[in-house]
Amino acid sequence: MKKRKFAFALSGLLALGTILGACGGKEETEETGTTTDTETTEETFSVAMVTDTGGVDDKSFNQSTWEGIQAFGEENGLEKGDGGFDYLQSASESDYVSNLTRLIRRDFDLVYAVGYLMHDAVVEVADQQPDAKIAIIDEVIEGKDNVASIMFRANEASFLAGVAAALESKSGKIGFIGGMEGPIIGGFQAGFEAGVAAVNPDIKVDVEYAASFSDAAKGQQIAKRMYDSGVDIIFHAAGGVGSGLFTEAKERKQKDPNANVWAIGVDRDQYDEGQVDADTNIVLTSVLKRVDVAAQEVAKLAQEGKFPGGETITYGLADQGVDLADSRGAISEETLAKVEEFKQQIIDGTIKVPEQPGE
Amino acid sequence: MSKRLVNILVPLISILLGLIIGAIVMAISGFSPVEGYVALWNGIFMDTYTMGETVRQITPYVFAGLAVAFAFRTGLFNIGVEGQLIMGWLAAAYVGFKFDLPTVIHLPLALIAAAVAGALWAFIPGLLKAKLQVHEVIVTIMMNYTALHVANSLIGTLSGGDERTPKVQETASLRSSFFESLTDYSRMHWGFVVALIAVLVMWFILEKTTRGYELKAVGFNKHASQYAGMNVNKNIILAMVISGAFAGLGGAMEALGTFENMSKLHGFTGIGFDGIAVALLGANQPFGVLLGAILFGSLKNGGLNMPSEAGVPTEIVNIVIALIIFFVASGYIIRVVLERFGKQRKEEK
Amino acid sequence: MEYVIEMLGIRKQFGDFVANDNITLQLKKGEIHALLGENGAGKSTLMNVLFGLYQPEAGTIRVHGKDVKITDPNVANKLGIGMVHQHFMLVENFTVTENIILGSEPTKMGTINIKDASKRVQELSEKYSLNVDANAKIEDISVGMQQRVEILKTLYRGAEILIFDEPTASLTPQEITELIQIMKRLIEEGKSIILITHKLKEIMEVSDRVTVIRKGQGIGTVITSETNPTELAELMVGRQVVFKTEKKDPNPTDTVLQIESLTVADNRDVDKVKGLNLTVRAGEIVGIAGIDGNGQSELIEAITGLRKVKSGKISLNGKDITGLKPRKITESGVGHIPQDRHKHGLVLDFPIGHNIALQTYYKAPISKSGVIDYKKVNEIARKIIEEYDVRSGEGEMSIARSLSGGNQQKAIIGREINRNPDLLIAALPTRGLDVGAIEFIHKRLIEQRDKGKAVLLISFELDEVMNVSDRIAVIHDGTIIDTVKPQETTEQELGLLMAGQSLHGKEKVGGENE
């Protein structure tokens, strides 16, 4: 009986779908028609992106990429949607491939894959769709002419954050919250630790990974432990986990306006996340990864027919792809001057910032 | 109203209700329900690619549903399908890339490894339940987290510090160039055949074998089973182990089909938890689970197309899909209520 | 004649099924009115109509001569109707008073005034000689005492008319005697009582008039003093019923079951069976009489392998079966009708056919290389269903839960006897069953004896033990304190033995009861 019920349930769905499908018939033929189109030579250039599971409003690099794409769209008078610019969110990791494929089939000229988690998906789709142009952020994929890799020397900006933290810390204890262990977050950690050590080798950075990029509760838990142990500045490179850090810091500041707690944001300027009240903010600065700038630039290159397929473009301090955000007075002038000094040395190549912890 | 008519009407009405309420939600949020549903439909059936992807999406749900349903039928609530699936995924990926064997040995070996890994992960809660009366819900929930972190750490170790295991060898892959050409490079793979076999296996175990009779008896009434000379503890453990094996095979679908490797997970896949809903949709019957998984997987896959084609944001899509599933499930509840009522009347006679 | 309650031409229908049809019941003030009928005859439905849980399709209810509509139990309470439920509705870890005021707590400025309530409960208890301690916790008092709490609850709420639903089902013989006295005392104080039961003996003993219903139909009302159990049984069942089961003299031969100084502990490791000795021979029925909780359950569980034996020896046909697994014991020739058929006897959610295979599902011809032949299962089930007259809606496919208690029990008995065991253990085989089913089951037990099987009967019903057994072993505090022959003893003597008094000490104390 029950089984039969389900058969009916499904046949019902099918029947309904047929009706809907009939309505949408026109669109269908259009879409299937375009998939086999060859290179478009029109004047407008369309761009789209696939987010990782963090979503487009992750206040981090997904959002940053989207901001870059939006800026590119504005500049070129594009509209959101087919032929303009758009994004698709991934609910789970198995959606990466289908989302990339979907956008390519909608004929976007350039598709961004945001995050190293999409490595496999990009490799797979790149083989199946040789005519598509894909740019992956935070990961290097070699040997595919239709894939450009965009990397950031986050370690360089993290180094500057480490310098600032070491100079500003009153307790002499500094914390680092990582997302998931791996080369990308490792870069943040290595740079940050090196920066701290460059100012004061005696300070040991308290490092803990949340094994997640989304578990804010875990972030708050780690932050609580660190602040309790006397740490006064915590840098996070952990995506959504970071909002737990901000929550904890803000709560402490609310309870005790004299509390000496600071957080350093990541990827975007996270100043807004740290607002306690009109004149209190717990964000010291943020390590900027100008994914928006990169996304815009690569789109421009592609539009001009100079898509860097098979290449890796690396953004560092020198080309302003990474930087520290405006501290809005939280960091003293002396410290800022010192930071500027180190910055110049890195750009000059006098200081080589390690890329992985322990290097 | 005749029983037959009710049988046809209840599911139709519940799906229709789900669609209507979903349409209202979309309309209120300022999106066109017609466009939304067209996109949903297209996301399931538009072309061979989407259909291939739909089948791919359905496959692991079948296993997760079977795992939950099997435990349910034997009186256990296995919330640990997620963790067992992760362990199965890892085991299959490992066997898949590590060994050089001909397909006839390699592929079955990878599948067996996944089943064994899932089974082992379920064996622990089974053992604790049988020997120490620790409730399996608690243990399985905790072991989901254990699985997640153990797997992530092992991926690092096995891949020499990388984010993901190497790709499985072609000899262990469920993918086929045949499906690729048929479905325009969708990730559809042979796993759906394995899933269909699993449905048959579960049906056979439960409905045909002596062991299945024992498992069901223990599930329904431990005391009567003990009185009848059955080894209750052994059956509890075995039920968990079989359930875990199904879950592990679900992981193999991801390892040998969808991804052909395993990346570090930054959160649960959700498949194991969705398996609970799939099992309930399927009334814990093997063939019901198959249909439940088809509904669930189709909606999930179709839903992905809604933001793209109709501009409906993911959040609204999730609400709409949840509504449809909710109404189908409550249609089932209505049915149960009707049946119970009928039964009571009979008892009073 | 003044009636406190009149239910006239009541008809209650569920869908197509008529549960009550044209039933009339008239309760006089100050009488005990028995409502007699088999299980499922519609007694409970009728009382639920009176209590406001169901609305009748036809008929009128009058209270003190006035037409009333009882729309819910609160209305019934206000009209002075109180129900003493068969399954007590008490909170275990609350005191007597707390339970009684539950739902109608007397409050003073928002706080419960437990002291006044407790005083009132105590007064009521004394007035009706109920002997209830108002401050005792429910979990600490006996089942009989709990029932009195239920009675107090109705009295506390001002009930004039008390409905007793199968009040003796879970009581010991002594408690039953006391309950009867309480009922008589209630009548003296001007209350009226409706007693729902299918036990003829109680009706004869306590009631003034009897209304009989059968299959939802009102059969009529008779005055108790002008009738007899045989007539009542016929009215109830609709055919002649034999009470005294006819049986030949026993012809016991070899010892089948031999129990030597058996000691068994319960779950809390308290010894419940203490050095017990017992012998059951082929061709005889040995009845174990005793008050619940004197080690019967532990004894049966030890014999059937469900409970660990602390010391002593159990042998079957000369073979030691002590400490074997239940299945091994079953296979050595023990059949067991468990005392709790829902818990141990059946998988209620299985079809009856599957249940009949519960002991044999793993053996040929049912199971072949791990696969069950359900055709064969159903074939065997159909045979047993027919032979043992198991009535069910869809034959062997009916879910066990949907069967009546009697039919469930018949299925279990059929299953056990069909295996042809040398020793058949029947624990409370007729609990909760009606006359027809009891008669059937007794016949089957005797039939087994006559076939040369050994039968061990455990029962709390003295009638049953006296009626069916060839020898009666009285159990008290974990030992058999005496073994008597039914034709050489009386219920009074057995009652004393069950209470632990040796016959050789104080003799013939009883006698005031009948």
Image (cartoon, coloured by chain):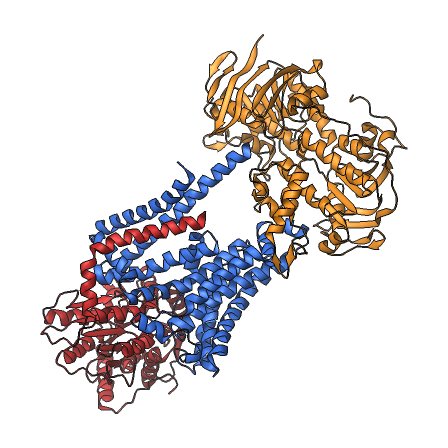
Chain colours: A red, B blue, C orange
Residue B151 appears left or right of A99: right
Nearer to the camera, C155 or B216: B216
Q: Quadrant of residue C293?
A: top right
Vertical side of C321 occupied by A110: above or below: below
Residue at coordinates 56% horizontally, 12% vertically from top-left? C3
Q: Quadrant of residue B41?
A: bottom left
Residue C395 appears left or right of A23: right
Vertical side of B206 occupied by A336: above or below: below
Q: Name the residue furthest bottom.
A: A350
Vertical side of C395 occupied by A323: above or below: below
In the rendered image, the quadrant that contains the N terminus of chain B is top left
Please state the horizontal and vertical placement of residue A331, each as a whole percent of the image: 24, 74
Residue at coordinates 16% horizontally, 65% vertically from top-left? A80
Please state the horizontal and vertical placement of residue C198, each as a whole percent of the image: 66, 27
Nearer to the camera, B229 or C268: B229
Residue A162 appears left or right of C373: left
Residue C268 in sight from this viewpoint: yes
Q: Name the residue furthest right.
A: C504
In the rendered image, the quadrant that contains the C terminus of chain B is top right
Q: Name the residue furthest top.
A: C1
Residue A54 appears left or right of C102: left
Nearer to the camera, B247 or A282: B247
